[in-house]
Image (cartoon, coloured by chain):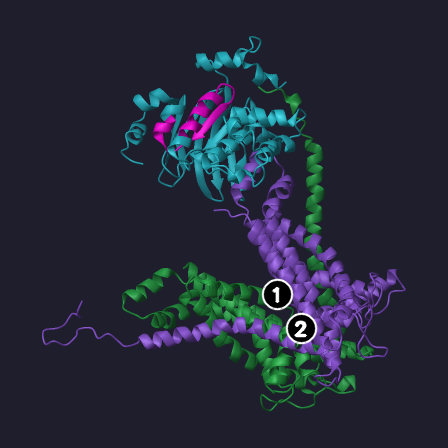
Chain colours: A purple, B green, C cyan
Amino acid sequence: MSDPTTDDGEPRFRRRSKTWEGGAVKWLFLACALVSILTTVGILVSLVINAWGFFTEIPIWDYLFGTRWSPILKPRDYGVLPLVSGTLLVTLIGALVAVPIGLASAIFLSEYAPDRLRRIIKPVLEILGGIPTVVYGYFALTWVTPQIQKILPDLLVFNALSAGLVLGLMIIPMVSSLSEDAMLAVPRSLKQAAYALGATRLEVSISIVVPAALSGVIAACIIGISRAIGETMLVTIAAGATPKLTLNPLESIQTMTAYIVQLSLGETPHGSLEFNTIFAVGLLLFFMTLVMNVGGHYVVRRWGLRYE
Amino acid sequence: MRSPSSFNHHLGRRKILGSIALVMFMSSVVVGILGLVVLLAQILFQGLEWLSPELIFNFPSRHPEQAGLKAAIFGTVWLMGLTAAFTVPVGVGAAIYLEEYASENWLTRLIEVNIANLAGVPSIVYGLLGLALFVQWLSMGRSVLAGALTMSLLVLPIVILASREAIKAVPETYRQAAFALGATKWEVVRSVVLPSASPGVLTGIILAMSRAIGETAPVIAISALVYLTFIPQNPLDRFTVLPIQIFNWIARPQEDFRGLAAGGIIVLLIILLSMNALAVFLRNRYQKQSVE
Amino acid sequence: MTETREGLDAPTVPKLFVNEHTASDESNTVIDVNKLDVHYGTFCAVRGVSMKIKENRVTAFIGPSGCGKSTVLRCFNRMNDLIPGARVTGEINFFGQDLYAAEVDPTEMRSRVGMVFQKPNPFPKSIYDNVAFGLKVNGYTGNYPDAVERSLKRAALWGEVKDRLKENALQLSGGQQQRLCIARALAPEPEVLLMDEPASALDPISTLAIEQLINDLCKDVSIIIVTHNMQQAARVSHETAFFMVNDDRAGYLVEFDDTSKIFTNPNDERTEAYITGRFS
């Protein structure tokens, strides 16, 4: 169709030639979105290339299954298991604190608490989640450890137990708030049906709400634990700097993240074998958390129930 | 009527169980809140006496009573300013693309999955990325610029997610009304969508910045040096930030430095709390407006 | 014992049987409502409802939206207790016992009053576990598989699901899900079954199945059904209550009588106007 024209033949509406502008803007925004993909690629490339320098000298087998980690002091050993066990030990303690307390808080907030109380408690828990991790480290070192030492006088100043306990406190808000979201998504009609059958509030919560929200609850726990694995400053400050293959929470250990910080603080020349260890450790750390996060999303997609 | 014998309700037992469970659920919440209270009390108790003008205006020192946060405060301001300058346009641009332009295809899905996964990558890993990419390969050195670029990548998912929520909340009718007046897509985005979404976007930016202020691990990987007695003059200068200075003081064995660290934490928490309060204030005002 | 149901055909328990067929004014009163008011906060949702609901009959609640018919229904198993700010005054006597008396435990009481909701809402569990849930929470002492089978048979679903009891209930069709919800509600052997627009989300064939089921069930359960569909009320119910909403949005009872009378010769002209479709 031709443009509508006025009597003197001039177009009444001038089609503005702005299509190029719209196109350019679209490509610009797409470029912004692609930064996120470049970030992932960048993480992988930078970790792999620097870790490659490490693995050309140390066989990957010795790295993954070696039981002694001493990259700086002789005799040198590059077995990452002590760092992994340190990370898992602290994470386990943290999970033992955060999962039960986080889930119980979520049940209380979603099924029991009146609206007004929930509106007070939730921001308080959010504050807990927004405190920098150095602060938690300070708390673990200067308050929690001395308190535990009153009961267990042999406890070292740097130990896995205090770090793990405070790590648990730190991820409670995350576990609690993500699980609560999943529980609030359980349709009210299901709860009503259970109440109408004569179930008590506890029975409704435990036999209807938690199972129906299970995928979200599990995902919340997985994401919380993955956060605990990657947590750095708290364990650097409070858990110690002695890589040790142990499951004794009273000992001083070192986590993968804490090792990376320790080495970054030293004056290790770039490109040296010692320097490249942090990328090898970082690569393993990245994969551990990636598996957990992908697992969390998978649980939600695979078993998440869709309600209308 | 049914005969009552075929059901044994155990009402008493179920009620007792319910009460025990309620007590347990409530005490779990109390544990979380109590942890927060004890943590804050410990820090105030240890740090209040160290709050002084010297703490704010002095450079770090070997002597606790003369040591201050000056370099760290200026480093934090530099880092935050540059981080915001990188994060805001890219984050909001990505959100606009995903909400307004992207069609349902593999690329969009890839970007979305990728952003979700990036949010779960440990911050120290970002530090390693920055160390390899910006410090070494792009030869920026251990500069505030390298730190800010790293921090931008770290908080980008937060800004994108918050901006997407805010853009999603703009009623479809606004867009339709603008389109019906003959506006192009870009004009609709610029003059209708962004203004309506700006309070939500701003809230997201503030939350991202408050996360960035408290982040320590990636900045240690970039900056390493924590004992600085000068203020960065340009983006390629070395720098330190508040949480690193605090960490440095915590790590010293002398009792006085612990107190100094607590004082530094109080300063840090005051900054964070005021930023969060601002975000909450903006969110509330925004919610009220959208109800009206 | 449970053979009350099984023994319907036995000559020893003819009472329910007789009731159903003589269907007369001699029926016992199941629920006696006296001056019922329901408030949500300061808002009065239902005002001054009094009625006597009879045993083993189907009673339909009809009326325009917002007239409080569902609210009244939800008073009969105290579901309104779950809504913060809801306040129920007046008396509801259930076989002579005041439901809202201080000593009545809503949990136990709810097991004696079943409820079926507007949209099918099976638990995301197996078919078997759905039906067994009410048995479990109420401490059923008999044989569970038998009780589950009995409930599914009463809900006319047994034939369709007997080979797939372990399957997730969400895999059933909408109509099957709703019959499963009926079976679930019947499992604790309630004396009264409340149905809140049970067929409004279903297709016509499933609706017909539910209506037939209501017809069969009322031999041994008193049924109260809220419906928007006047034909449905006319088809399934023995008695009909017509509710309306007044100017300050409070629902009230206009007329309560035999269904045949309500639909052919109502006492109140507002009922007649509604039945003949002059307002909705």
Q: Where is residue B281 in the image (x, y as percent from the top left)?
A: 52, 67
Tally the marks. Answer: 2
Quarter of the image for the C terminus of chain C: give it. top left
Q: Name the residue under label 2.
A: B124
Q: Which of B271 and A243 is in front in this view?
A: A243
Q: Which residue is drawn at 90% across and 64% down?
A: A154
Q: Where is residue B52 in the image (x, y as percent from the top left)?
A: 71, 82
Residue type, mark 2 in image: Ile
Q: Residue at x 59, y 55 (%)?
A: A298
Seen in the picture, residue A222 relative to C52 is either above or below; the reply is: below
Name the secondary structure under disc 1: loop
Q: Is residue A115 magenta?
A: no
Q: Which residue is drawn at 43% across and 67% down?
A: B197
On screen, residue C8 versus residue B141, left or right, reads left
Quarter of the image for the N terminus of chain C: give it. top right
Task: Tell me which segment is drawn in magenta.
Answer: C207-233
